[in-house]
Amino acid sequence: MNKFLLTQFFIILLSVPSMAQLMSVNESSLSQAEIEFTPSELKSALNNEIDGLMTKVVKWRHHFHQYPELGNREFETSKYIAQILRDLGLEVNTGIAYTGITAYIRGDNPGPLIALRADIDALPVTEMTNLPYASKVTTQYQGNEVGVMHACGHDAHIAILLGVADFLSRNTDKLNGDILLIFQPAEEGPPEGEEGGAELMLKEGIFDEKPDVVFGLHVTNSFNGAVALKSGPAMASAEAFRINITGTQSHGSTPWASNDPIMAAFDIGTSLQTIISRRIDIRENPAVISVGIVKAGSRNNIIPETAMLEGTIRTFSKDISDLIHKEMETIVTNIARAHNVEAEVNFAVYGSYPVTFNDPELVARYSKSLIEATNGIFTSDVSASTGAEDFSFFAQEVPGLYFWLGVNAEGVVSAPGNHTPYFVVHDSALDKGVKSFINLVSDYSTDNSTN
């Protein structure tokens, strides 16, 4: 047994937006704990192979980072993943939910079916990292020419899971049970009017052979190689809303001749925030309403006919989501009436994600697997994140465990965060992701082996 002191890890959420962490913990919650080593043939084999394996993982990640693709359009990404899996001798299933992939690794010994998931899509973000393998890809998104970047680190998720697949496919003699590899498209959401992501993969039957458990991870801007895990509700539900406002157009010099949708949009956007501050007891029910898009007008001296607001709702309870819907409809209807305009609010315009729930029994039993994998740089004392994940759909079907991996440069505790053009995944942290997955597989399969 080795004692360790958790230090310099997951510093308090910073006030600078680009440095904000999706999962953060108060420094005062860090405490001493012990590493419990549970030896296994799989873990021993990984320790012997890890250096050579990580050379492949890093090479793969750099490729995926340089050539990112948006959700439901990950055509080349999917082909590249599928070829690697075929080269490992696996039977590969492609074209699931447009560009998704699954493959099975069958262990030589009886045991459970364990699902491991990685998301594969990128974001409409123009990269500003100046990395030698930085993305220069551009595409059309919502009518605009945009850059494309793995600004949420899904390139790391793909490479880590491919590393796990590479290792396990060569060590089936040490594997109890089977592995279902899931490479999932459109985690960031499919294009409007399309289905996609985890929900569509399930709809198309990837759990027809139902796993006993599902594991997933996400990289973030925190201490290099550290892992965080939250029991119970770990990430919020999420849905987008859109408010369309229609008034009467006029010349800007005669505003009295208009029914101004822009003024109505101003009032609606401001008043939405009173739902959180005046209608919800946020001590027990954290929630977020954020407006991210405002569109209106085409010229400085024309009051337009229409305006549009679009934003996101985050909660940890369906009852609170329902209350927010009701309050938003009340605000939109009455403010529109006051401005003599018409307004309509639509919810879940790109679909919605449920709360990501980490099975408490899995957290209690297998935190030790992650502690061992990270040599003790671990905490389960974290606040829930108002970020959202469609891993939640998988975890609604079978018990799930979803953890966070810090990928800052070594010794750096504050760095630009996910979804920013400056987000950088440092390769030196990725071995902890591979080890975490292998430890979870080893310990869970041993505990649930039918030998």
Image (tube, grey):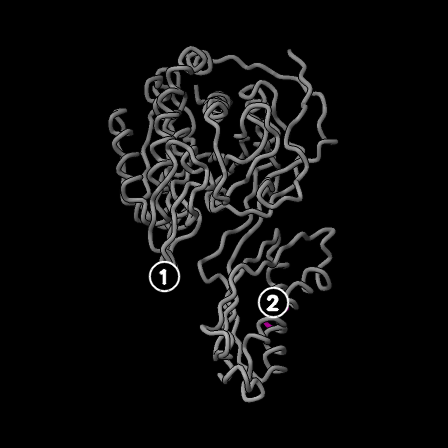
Residue depicted at 56% across the width and 47% down the height = 387
Q: Is residue 283 left or right of residue 289?
A: right
Residue type, numbered disc 1: Gly
Q: Position of residue 401 (x, y in %)?
A: 53, 35
Q: Main SS of the magenta segment?
A: helix
Split into 4 quadrants, where in the image is the N terminus? top right
Q: Is residue 387 visible?
A: yes
Q: Which residues are magenta?
A: 325-329
> Which is closer to the viewer, label 2 or label 1?
1
Q: Is residue 216 left or right of residue 380?
A: left
Residue depicted at 61% across the width and 20% down the height = 376
Mark 1 crowdedness (10 Å alpha carbons): few <14, some 14-19, many ≥20:
few
Q: Position of residue 406 (x, y in %)?
A: 55, 30
Location of mark 2 (residue): 269
State the separation of the CA atoms marked 2 and 1. Answer: 24 Å
**Secondary structure of the residue carrying numbered label 2:** helix
Q: Earlier in the sequence, mark 2 or mark 1?
A: 1
Split into 4 quadrants, where in the image is the C terminus? top left
